[in-house]
Image (spheres, rainbow, N blue to C red):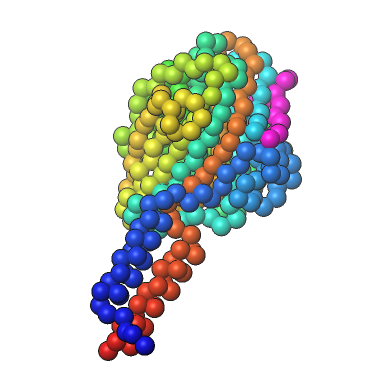
Amino acid sequence: MKKMGISGISVVVMCLCGLSAQRVSADVTLFNDTFGSGSTLNAAPSAPTANSTSYEQGLGVTVTGSSGSIASGDLSLRSGTTSSIVDEIGALFTTSPLTLSGIGSEIDLQIVWVGTSNILTGTSSGTSQVAIGLYNSGGSAPQQGTTIFSSTSSPTGGAKGWDGYGANVFQAATAKIYPRSPQNNGTLATNQELLFNNASSSQSYHDPSGGNLTGASKSSTNNLTAGATYTSELRITLTGAASLAVSNTLFSGAGTGGTVLWSENGTTNNATDLTFDGLAFGWRYSGTSAASQLDINSIAVTTNIPEPSTWMLVGSGLALMVGLARRRR
């Protein structure tokens, strides 16, 4: 049998390294939901799949006309007529939480949505905002059904212990990227709220609230068009053993190929949790008394961390290379 020479082994090494580098740099889709494959809203939670999960809606206060619905291509959230309310959804996106484990590893959340009515438009004040977040749930799904954050009912379990990061885009105020830590309040349902970081002491989490990440405090002006499509993106990248870079970007249109309407970056050097399996998205309406509505078209979570099968393939190739080298000797 003809033996493989050094040049042949070199080719194997180059191919394996090329394969490894290609897979590390390419996005791996963890979750991609367009709401036509079994996802539910405000129903009993079930385990998420690659393209479905159980979404639970949260509202700051009880307002007549507030509701939600889910159908293929449209997760619709509606807030009744009021001058101040937060409205959001939370969900688990995987049964295998992702841990950022190597410098440059990242997780990316993209949400395509339509500002159907009064989402950062003329009737709302400058403090109105759209917010997005990624979290470690600790294995606890959001509470089933619509949670009223100003209520004193059902304060425990659910998303109370979720730990992660949120970011906002204001109509005309100072936007931030901030940590959301497990909540301590034992009597208020604000401990179930995930996104709005002390925007309202009666409707949003505040025990503790989160200070903004380094560099993430930037004047935000966004006057959106009713009925237009936008994409919100939150990207978290590991830059050191306990260091993260977090970016929050708003694009026009569906996907990240449109015009960048807003972008902000922040960093932290004392991250204590690098694991993610939960997400949230929503808005706060504040302004002239009016109803508001936001419709989500799709939600996707990606990473650049290779799937386990990739490393198995690389490992098998390296074992083959070692065996060939030994035979040559």
**Segment colored magenta:** 60-72
x%, y% of residue 9? 30, 75
Query: Eyeballing the image, is 206 above or below 321?
Result: above
Seen at 63% across and 22% down, the residue is: 293
Query: Eyeballing the image, is 50 above or below 224?
Result: below
The total of numbered circles placed on residues is 0
**Residue 111 is covered by the magenta coloring:** no
| Nearest to the observer: residue 326 or residue 27 | 326
x%, y% of residue 218? 35, 26
Please state, as top left, top right, bottom left or bottom right, where the C terminus lies in the image: bottom left
Seen at 66% across and 24% down, the residue is: 78
**Residue 63 is covered by the magenta coloring:** yes
Seen at 46% across and 25% down, the residue is: 252
Please state, as top left, top right, bottom left or bottom right, where the N terminus lies in the image: bottom left
Furthest-front residue in this view: 1
| Nearest to the observer: residue 83 or residue 283 | 283
Seen at 38% across and 29% down, the residue is: 263
Query: Eyeballing the image, is 87 above or below 2?
Result: above
**Residue 104 appears in the rendering:** yes
| Nearest to the observer: residue 204 or residue 306 | 306
Furthest-left residue in this view: 6
x%, y% of residue 112? 54, 32
**Residue 180 appears in the rendering:** no
| Residue 219 occupies quadrant | top left
| Nearest to the observer: residue 84 or residue 280 | 280
x%, y% of residue 327? 33, 88
| Residue 174 occupies quadrant | top left
| Residue 66 occupies quadrant | top right
Q: Main secondary structure of the magenta part?
A: loop
